[in-house]
Amino acid sequence: MNKLRCVNKSMAKSNKLNKKILAKRNFFINVGIVISIADGIVSIQGLNKVAYGEMIAFCVGNRRITGLVLNLEVSKISAVVLGDDQDIKPGQYVIRKYDLMSVPTGQSLLGRVVDPLGNPLDDLGPIVTKTSRFIESRAPSIIVRSPVNSSLETGLKVVDALVPIGHGQRELIIGDSKTGKSSIAIDTILNQKGKDTLCVYVAIGQKRSSVARIARVLREHGCMDFSVIVAATASDSAALQYIAPYSGCSMGEYFMHKGLRVLLVYDDLSKHAVSYRQISLLLRRPPGREGYPGDVFYLHSRLLERAANLLNSGSLTALPIIETIQGDVSAYIPTNVISITDGQIFLETELFTRGIRPAVSPGLSVSRVGSAAQNRVIKKMAGSLKLELAQFREVEDFTKLGFVLDEATKRLVDRGEKLTRLLVQNRYSPIDIVDQTIFLYAALNGFLDGIPVDAVSRYEVELYSFLKNSLFYAPLKYHLHNSLNARLMNFILGQFRLYFIKYML
């Protein structure tokens, strides 16, 4: 009997122990405890059923701080804190949100400056929206895509003529620091005023003052009503900079699936790669080539592949920006993004310092969509413009050496200098495609002959003023969108040339 009592007691003790273990396991299915925290990376014990990329909440008093699960290990998980981590201490509870990382979307975001979590950064009150989207989603399949054949006009003469961009395209803007990369993107947004394109500008790792300046420029030009600015500034954590482009892409995808056209600017992905590298090393993932993790290519490809021109629906056009060091396009990050995108607008420091702005290199810039997405009138003149600029580049160096040139070469140099000056454009002043057509026609058909190079800018201003003050400008503008009447253009430009030479020079 005594032996039987001892066996029953031991079985009861083991059952209690098993119940405690089971209760503990059930408790840790959806709840975890912070083990350690350093540099925004939190190690957590528990959360046994949590998924990769899922949102979690750190219980800090009455507040809930959002985190993102990025590492799943045998005995623990690691997550990044999307916010201030100063109040998170070891021993605090962490709970699941039962949802993958998502951001709010909807029309209420238009005209606002938000952080990557959708929280407002301006003084316009809270954002009320009932819809949200996962920041990570599959790119549209080939079946649901349609060819890129509709022009997205940037308002920049050199881009619309030489490197045309279409709705649904991914066109890289690449160049050294302070060469005007962001200006090209901002001018493109300004040129969408009055058109059917919404814009999302994602600022990654920039100064707060720079983001405020861009927001002010958009408001002054009346373009903030159809734009969203997603800002993860240099003072924010690397985790917020990491998710910023994905958040902006999800906000743009909402409008794309509603059948609208969206322009998305990533400024810039070089800082995005640096932020991911920082997170990756803190998570103790193995580094790859050139000190960057081996999955940086996947990091940007799964982002940029989401740009598309959907069949019978909307489109998402991506303009990623990459910063090079001393023009080195063969570095790891530039070569990655070049191979993903459908072309690049290359900005040269030498052209920028010579006052040729935007400093787009006609030789190194390319659009792999080609003229399929170009205005049909500009398309007829683009070939001649590229050829004359290429010929001018070949003989330009000889003119600096002081060689005696024959008459044909002199005419080539004179025409090339005027064409180069023609493509110079002030910042924040996009030009309508019809006005570009008229001036390109004038330059390529000899109507600038006899006008000095330093008077080309004045000729352009006076020509635009002459046309806009005339009665026939409205029908001419409507006509030039689809076809070019050479006789009419020759008459108008010929009369204006005589007037300009007689009274303006």
Image (cartoon, rainbow, N blue to C red):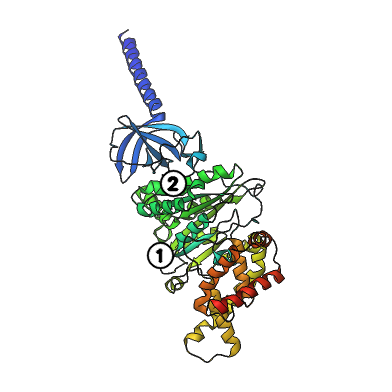
For residue 479, say whether it is visible.
yes
User: Which of 79/13 is in front?
Assistant: 79
**Percent position (x, y) of residue 357?**
47, 68
**Percent position (x, y) of residue 458?**
51, 72
**Percent position (x, y) of residue 308?**
59, 51
| Dot 1 alpha-carbon crowd within 10 angstroms: few under 14, some 14 to 19, many 20 or more | few
- Quarter of the image for residue 157 reads bottom right
Whichever of callouts 2 and 1 sits on the residue coming sooner in the sequence is 1
Horizontal side, residue 471 vs residue 298: left or right? right
For residue 105, say whether it is visible.
no
- Dot 1 falls on a residue whose secondary structure is loop
Q: Amino acid at mark 1?
A: Lys
**Percent position (x, y) of residue 359?**
48, 69
| Eye-nearest disc, 2 or 1 | 1
Residue at image position (50%, 91%) is: 403
Residue at image position (49%, 77%) is: 454
Q: Which residue is mark 2?
A: 243
- Quarter of the image for residue 440 reads bottom right
- Quarter of the image for residue 268 reads bottom left
- How many marks the image carries: the answer is 2
Q: State how far apart marks 2 and 1 are (Cα).
A: 25 Å
Residue ranking furthest to the bottom: 404
Q: Which residue is mark 1?
A: 178
Q: Amino acid at mark 2?
A: Ile
- Dot 2 falls on a residue whose secondary structure is helix
User: Which of 248/434 is in front?
Assistant: 434
Residue at image position (33%, 50%) is: 235
